Image: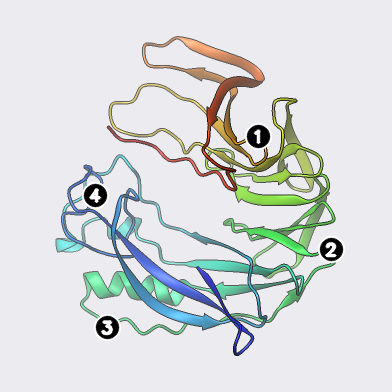
Amino acid sequence: MTTWNPASQTGALVVIAMGDKSGSYSSSWSESYPGLPNPGHFASAQVLGTVALPFTAPTSVDAWSDSSGSLALERGTVEDGAHRDTVAGSGYAVVGDLSASQVAVVDLTSTLQGIAAQYYDGTALAFDAAAGEALPFDGGVADVAAAEAGPAVATSDGKVHELDRELAETAATDVGANPTCLVVGAQSGQFIATSRGAGTISWVAGGEVAKQLADSRLTDPLCASETPALDVKNYAGTAAVVLVSDFEGKKLHAYLDGQATIPGGAAVGGDGFSYAGAYDVAGKPWAASVTVDLE
């Protein structure tokens, strides 16, 4: 998470390890291990450290790691090195500042390796993560997203800038005015940019808009998110669903992306997006995040 300190006019990244609730699911650990891969049913948290940032007012953050943990795993304890091969060994966070129109990257590899060593080897964790130099962008940094190949930056002038791991720009794609949300698709792996000005959701990859969602039922889309892959125990179907938060419309809209197979083998949907309905919200939804219920 990011913090501002108005007194000192400094910004920081606080790195927090989250622990799941033991025994909630088959993929839950039977003991609390904050920072190890888990199904996200959180019951504990541990502040690992704070990283000073090269700008004052961080407004966006995202992170990536090479963890290969799966919801289908059956976990117990870390005894005998169980599931160590699924624990992240490298990763980074990318942080943006709208007012300064700058981005900084924090290498979290030593932190992630230290978490693993703490539980599996009994080694004390030494937090030494530090931010790199600020990288400037024209147009105002609206949001950031982190992926394996490198981060992406959405700027308020309507572009998504794709970067490699060395922070060299590899592509810049027009997605429409005032992008308010940039995420990595849980199934597509592409950058998903929601443009409030254009009222569209764009899937960006390699400098091109691979596909785009526009619907008159979307009054004021602010953010979109894909469902994760449904590789969970005893589930026989496949579906890619997109959830869109509609700020002024006070709704969450759902769309089926392409064709899906439901348990039993029947197919629903087809080419493009199929509207799946809306959920009325008691307020104005700002963001959208999708997970999987294992029960």
User: Is 161 placed above or below 219 here?
Assistant: below
Q: Residues within 10 Å of mark 4 (few under 14, many from 20)?
A: many
User: Is 48 placed above or below 163 here?
Assistant: below
Please give the label number shown on residue 249.
1
Residue in the image at 64% along x and 86% along y: 9
Q: Is residue 44 left or right of residue 270?
A: left
Q: Residues within 10 Å of mark 1 (few under 14, many from 20)?
A: some
Q: Residue 93 at x, y = what percent?
A: 55, 67
Going from the N terminus, do you reach mark 2 or mark 3 first?
A: 3
Q: Which marked residue is nearer to the observer: mark 1 or mark 4?
A: 1
Please give the label number shown on residue 1.
none
Q: Nearer the viewer, residue 6 or 254?
A: 6
Mark 1 vs mark 3, CA separation in Å: 50 Å
Tell me which amino acid carries mark 1. Gly
Mark 2 vs mark 1, CA separation in Å: 27 Å
Going from the N terminus, do you reach mark 2 or mark 1 first?
A: 2
**Pointer 4 residue:** 28
Tell me which amino acid carries mark 2. Gly
